[in-house]
Amino acid sequence: MVKIPPLQLTRARLETKRYLLVDGAQCKTPSHLLRQSSSRIMVAPLFSGLMADKTTDVSPYLVQLLEDGDPSRQLQLLAASITSVGAVTVIETLAHFHDLLQRLTRRLDLVLGDDTGSLARYFDGRVLPHLAGALTQEQHAAFFSLARRWWYVAPDLSWKVLDGSYTEMDAFTPPLRLDEQQRNAVIDGCYPHTMIEHFALTDGELLDTVLEMERYDFFRQVLDSAKTYGITGGPDAVRFCAEALLTGFDFHLQPEWIGPLAEVRAGRRRLRQVITDIYAN
């Protein structure tokens, strides 16, 4: 369970509306929980993410907030089931529920530089800021024309906000297109989250050696260090991060590692072999 901090917002103006966007992949049984919150609010999935077992639901849900725009009740209801910091974002807009749902749905299609189709995971609060940062000024204005403001939980467990550029007529034309440089920027920005998720699933006790609010920065620093040895992903990146968790983020600067890692950089040895040899001695 991840503790999402309270979001303190002033009462929404009469014409302003606020909504939760909940990523079902990071929240256990989101539809059941959200529909318990109030019979007066509307809840709808952006697409069906119900898995074959009929019990696992990874759908992203748009959730209407009550008239005052205060997300506290829904956040409290979801609190015990949230498994990651990206589970919930908050959108402030002038759009009505079904209009916003349509606008969000239109932004799901992503086309990469090689014309490969993919899913734009903006509904994941871990991805949202990196996607926003990778867009050109024109892309940003069009993509965020659905919102005035869009809050997400940062890795340090504080709420941050992205400014939107709401327009009455949706300025976005699907699909969203990212060139190779933009794609790489999003992947690189999200990679520490990938490592956090990996160790949460495979070795939670080891991950717990780093405070939750410091984990992103820890893995960011470790992965940047790994790049200096030509390690940019895959099993060797996981091994490098595991060693950093075990012995410290700067383990690679210790005398016994300097020479062997230089050989890794030169392509003469693999990290797995180096780790085996060091621990054998």
Image (spheres, rainbow, N blue to C red):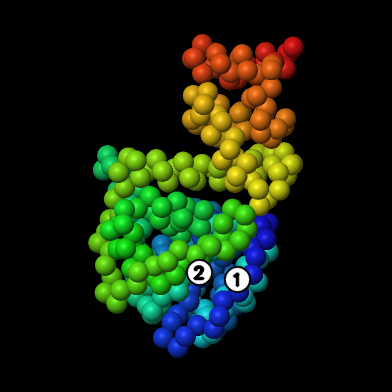
Query: Disc 1 marks which amino acid?
Result: Leu
Q: CA distance from mark 2 to mark 1?
A: 9 Å
- What residue appears at the point 52 percent right and 80 percent down from the top-left corner? 69
- What residue appears at the point 26 percent right and 74 percent down from the top-left corner? 169
What x and y, as percent, mark residue 93? 41, 75
What residue is shown with label 1?
A: 7
What x and y, as percent, mark residue 157? 62, 58
108 left or right of 126 in image: left
Mark in front: 2 vs 1: 1
- What residue appears at the point 35 percent right and 48 percent down from the top-left corner? 118
- Compare marks 2 and 1 and give the one earlier in the sequence: 1
In terms of depth relative to the viewer, which is nearer, 157 or 87?
Answer: 157
In terms of depth relative to the viewer, which is nearer, 89 or 136?
Answer: 136
Q: Is residue 273 visible?
A: no
Query: Disc 2 marks which amino acid?
Result: Val
Q: Quadrant of residue 180?
A: top left
In terms of depth relative to the viewer, which is nearer, 155 or 57?
Answer: 155
What residue is shown with label 2?
A: 90
What x and y, as percent, mark residue 203? 69, 39
> Quarter holding the N terminus?
bottom right
Vertical comparison of 71 with 249: above or below: below
